[in-house]
Image: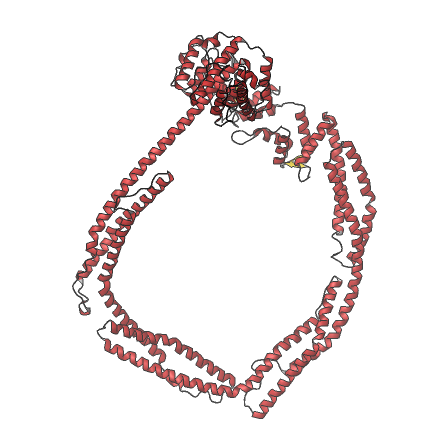
């Protein structure tokens, strides 16, 4: 809660209306204090006031003060010195104050311009409340209560300090000294102070605050000591400066931490820069030494006869491998570390808004990368040159072994192929045999084509060995030429055999074509007849007129295809006759069976006659089923017509019952209406019986679906039974609610409020609230206890246990009503007190003296400490107190 609340400002304004004549001492104290407070802010803009009653009369310094303390620009003031200009400027200031939610009572611009001290002090006090004290909030208390609670907590550990108000509690000065010592123990020695010397205590506190905390002296020690009750507003104004000063100390500490972080980052960056420069210099120097060695290409000339004596080359190769394996890897790691450090440094500089780091000329990352690239180029050239001769000899050795291996494979494959190609095995064969010989020859041609690549490889190897000057190249060339000549002969014989096989194939093609034509046409026609036969004898099961009509129409469509089928049948019979004639004309000495089909003309004739016999039988069965389904459809219409009346009636009455439960009204009226509905539901039973009779006819006819209604007998029957159960359950609930209301002494208005609150959060109309809905309902009634600092809510858990003893996660309206009736009678229980102590103890089973002194007023804390027994549990700590037995004793539930 803040001072923006209208009630708070109204209370402040009423004080001024009632105090038309201020106590002279209070007026003097407020004048001193408010003047010092105003100057503490005005000095920020280079000005101050001397007489608070007069210096604000032209409105200029008043506007200046508001701009300093708010940080905002007000309306531009009038520059004239006439009264109307002054009133205008003061009014602008008052309008700004009112725009901040402050309601000024009896304070007008004319009173300020006329130097009315009482009104001026009232206005300044309103400004102090709004801009200096309003933002002080401790545990959701008001600003004044929050400031008082802050003082109490900060001074609680100090002897002889008991802050109860903002007047007499500050007369001895110890409270001021305690606030300073609590935050800055280095500024004064609190233990050396005495309650009997208020003059010294006050002067010490005011001087230390002014010198070290930048809080000007706003109070006079003599005014405080010599006044029975010091001015409360003056004390509050001065104490609020302590509050803001110590809040600023934390900001200063944060600023120091920020500076340390920035300086530490700078130091780390400089280390990374030095490390980069050192690594770059070392790496560039090493590269400079190694490149001449890698670029040296001098070795004794070697040829094949002397290939075994390459000791010099091998020694240099070993030296190069030592460089690659042992000397270079650490330098590679240094290069990677160098780049990592550079990237890390640039990232840190960028993130901290620092300029990028630029290394010395010649030591850039690009320079190092360029040098390293040159090193690797020299390295690659060195290695290529050193191994080139050995590779040539190794290559020649490999090619020789590969050449002989491939020649052996090819020669083994080609053995016997020429006699096979010259064989006349195709004479006197049938078409299928000529096909087999042709396929075999095509396979050979594919195999021949596959070996083409090996022959080309043999020729390519021989050519490469010639280029590399193989020392024994003669036998290689001779063997290669023999293989190529044989390959040409195989190609010629293969082409000749393929032409001969194709000529013989054409002679037998004519006979085979008739077999194939018959097979192509016979297979689909035979499949059609088998499918037709299967469909004509298929057993069908339908449940509607549309379904049987859906079978009749395809059957009619089938009958329409019979003329075309007759033509296809005649065509197949004609092809069979042509095949017989062809065999007879040419006296073909070969198997007369069709190689492409197992069907014969005789098979097709038999199946066609069977189809023609089954068609009229299918016609008769379909028409009989159509008559049966038309009868079933009439039964469906009869049931649907009645169900479409009964079902909506049950739904409408059910909706009426549910809506009535949510409506406002007297319980007795609801009870009376429900009993009338109960009678109507009972009287409606004859309609249910009539529907049951129709349903029995439908079931006897084995009808399972009805598209004319969405209702089934089961849904209507369940709806009727649930409606009856609901009405009787609601009658019982309302009778119980009436009994509860009367026994608990709850008024009709209270009961209606409880029921409406429950219904609002019972969104699914189940008559139950889950844990979240119940908590929201209590919050709407301002009865939900707040969560503690850890986010837990032990008090709400206790309430939940009382309304949900079975822990099923729901609260019924009866349990809610019982709880609200207890709350409405404003009684406490020992369990509620135990829950409150557990919250203060941080959810522990015991509480300490420190917890009590910190959380309760001192007199109440001392009361509890004096009466609580020591805690005996194993989880206790030294000095632990037993609040459980104490709470029980408060309600006379134990002998403690």
Residue 144 x %, y %: 53, 20
Residue shown at 48% from the left, 11% from the top: 171
Instruction: Name the image quarter holding residue 675.
Output: top right
Q: Looking at the image, how many numbered discs can be counted on the residues?
A: 0
Name, please, the residue furthest toward the left. 300
Up the image or down, 433 lies above or below 668; here it is below
Position of residue 62 in the picture relative to residue 727 (left or right):
left
Residue 689 x %, y %: 82, 49
Residue shown at 54% from the left, 18% from the top: 83
Please identify the quadrant where the N terminus is shown: top right
Position of residue 383 in the picture relative to residue 508 (left or right):
left
Viewer-nearest residue: 12 or 368? 12
Viewer-nearest residue: 598 or 336? 336
Q: Is residue 859 visible?
A: no
Residue shown at 73% from the left, 37% from the top: 661
Up the image or down, 555 lies above or below 329; here it is below
Position of residue 523 in the picture relative to residue 671 (left or right):
left
Please identify the quadrant where the C terminus is shown: top right
Q: Is residue 31 visible?
A: yes
């Amino acid at each position: 809660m803040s001072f923006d609340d209208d009630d708070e400002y109204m209370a402040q304004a009423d004080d001024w209306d009632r105090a038309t004549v201020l106590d002279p001492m209070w007026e003097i104290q407020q004048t001193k204090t408010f003047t010092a407070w105003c100057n503490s802010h005005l000095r920020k803009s280079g000005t101050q006031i001397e007489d608070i009653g007069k210096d604000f009369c032209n409105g200029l310094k008043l506007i200046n003060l508001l701009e300093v303390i708010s940080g905002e620009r007000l309306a531009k003031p009038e520059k004239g010195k006439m009264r109307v200009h002054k009133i205008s400027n003061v009014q602008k200031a008052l309008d700004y104050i009112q725009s901040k939610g402050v309601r000024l009572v009896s304070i007008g611009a004319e009173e300020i311009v006329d130097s009315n001290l009482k009104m001026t002090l009232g206005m300044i006090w309103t400004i102090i409340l709004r801009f200096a004290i309003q933002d002080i909030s401790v545990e959701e208390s008001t600003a004044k209560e929050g400031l008082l609670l802050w003082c109490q907590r900060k001074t609680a550990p100090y002897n002889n300090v008991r802050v109860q108000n903002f007047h007499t509690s500050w007369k001895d000065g110890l409270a001021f000294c305690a606030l300073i010592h609590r935050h800055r123990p280095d500024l004064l020695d609190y233990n050396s102070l005495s309650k009997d010397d208020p003059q010294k205590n006050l002067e010490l506190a005011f001087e230390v605050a002014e010198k070290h905390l930048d809080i000007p002296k706003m109070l006079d020690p003599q005014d405080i000591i010599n006044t029975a009750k010091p001015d409360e507003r003056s004390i509050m104004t001065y104490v609020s400066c302590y509050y803001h000063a110590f809040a600023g100390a934390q900001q200063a500490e944060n600023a120091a931490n920020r500076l340390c972080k920035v300086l530490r980052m700078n130091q780390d960056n400089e280390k990374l820069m030095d490390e980069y420069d050192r690594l770059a210099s070392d790496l560039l120097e090493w590269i400079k030494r190694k490149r001449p060695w890698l670029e040296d290409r001098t070795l004794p000339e070697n040829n094949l006869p002397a290939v075994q004596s390459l000791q010099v080359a091998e020694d240099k190769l070993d030296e190069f491998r030592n460089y690659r394996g042992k000397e270079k890897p650490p330098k590679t790691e240094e290069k990677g570390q160098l780049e990592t450090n550079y990237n890390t440094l640039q990232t840190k500089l960028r993130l901290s808004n620092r300029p990028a780091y630029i290394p010395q000329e010649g030591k850039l990352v690009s320079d190092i990368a360029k040098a390293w690239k040159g090193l690797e180029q020299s390295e690659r050239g060195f290695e290529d040159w050193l191994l080139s001769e050995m590779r040539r000899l190794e290559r020649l050795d490999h090619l020789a072994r590969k050449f002989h291996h491939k020649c052996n494979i090819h020669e083994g494959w080609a053995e016997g192929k020429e006699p096979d190609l010259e064989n006349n095995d195709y004479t006197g064969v049938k078409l299928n045999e000529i096909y087999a010989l042709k396929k075999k020859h095509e396979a050979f041609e594919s195999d021949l084509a596959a070996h083409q690549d090996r022959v080309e490889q043999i020729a390519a190897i021989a050519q490469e060995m010639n280029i590399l000057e193989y020392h024994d190249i003669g036998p290689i060339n001779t063997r290669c030429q023999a293989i190529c000549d044989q390959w040409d002969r195989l190609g010629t014989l293969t082409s000749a055999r393929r032409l001969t096989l194709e000529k013989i194939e054409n002679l037998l093609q004519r006979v085979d074509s008739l077999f194939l034509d018959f097979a192509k046409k016979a297979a689909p026609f035979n499949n059609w007849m088998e499918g037709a036969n299967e469909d004509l004898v298929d057993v069908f099961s339908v449940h509607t007129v549309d379904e049987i009509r859906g079978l009749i129409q395809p059957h009619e469509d089938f009958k329409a295809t019979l003329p075309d089928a007759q033509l296809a049948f005649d065509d197949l019979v004609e092809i069979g006759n042509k095949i017989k004639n062809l065999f007879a004309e040419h006296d073909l000495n070969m198997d007369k069976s069709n190689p492409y089909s197992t069907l014969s003309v005789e098979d097709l004739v038999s199946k066609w006659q069977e189809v023609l016999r089954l068609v009229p039988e299918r016609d008769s069965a379909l028409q009989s089923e159509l008559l049966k389904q038309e009868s079933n459809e009439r039964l469906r219409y009869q049931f649907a017509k009645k169900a479409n009346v009964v079902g909506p009636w049950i739904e409408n009455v059910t909706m009426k019952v549910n809506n009535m439960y949510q409506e406002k009204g007297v319980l007795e009226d609801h009870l009376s209406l429900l009993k009338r509905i109960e009678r109507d539901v009972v009287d409606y039973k004859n309609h249910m019986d009539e529907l049951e009779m129709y349903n029995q006819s439908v079931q006897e006819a084995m009808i399972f679906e009805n598209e004319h209604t969405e209702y089934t007998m089961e849904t209507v029957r369940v709806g009727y039974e649930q409606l009856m159960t609901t009405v009787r359950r609601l009658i019982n609930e309302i009778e119980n609610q009436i009994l509860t209301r009367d026994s608990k002494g709850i008024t009709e208005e209270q009961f209606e409020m409880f029921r409406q609150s429950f219904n609002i959060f019972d969104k699914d109309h189940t008559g139950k609230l889950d844990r979240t809905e119940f908590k929201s309902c209590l919050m709407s009634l301002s009865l939900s206890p707040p969560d503690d600092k850890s986010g837990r809510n032990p008090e709400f858990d206790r309430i939940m246990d009382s309304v949900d003893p079975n822990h099923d996660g729901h609260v019924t309206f009866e349990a809610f009503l019982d709880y609200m009736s207890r709350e409405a009678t404003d009684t406490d229980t020992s369990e509620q007190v135990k829950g409150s102590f557990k919250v203060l103890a941080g959810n522990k089973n015991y509480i300490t003296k420190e917890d009590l002194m910190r959380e309760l007023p001192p007199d109440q804390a001392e009361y509890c400490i004096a009466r609580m027994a020591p805690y005996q549990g194993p989880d206790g700590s030294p000095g632990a107190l037993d609040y459980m037995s104490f709470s029980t004793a408060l309600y006379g539930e134990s002998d403690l």
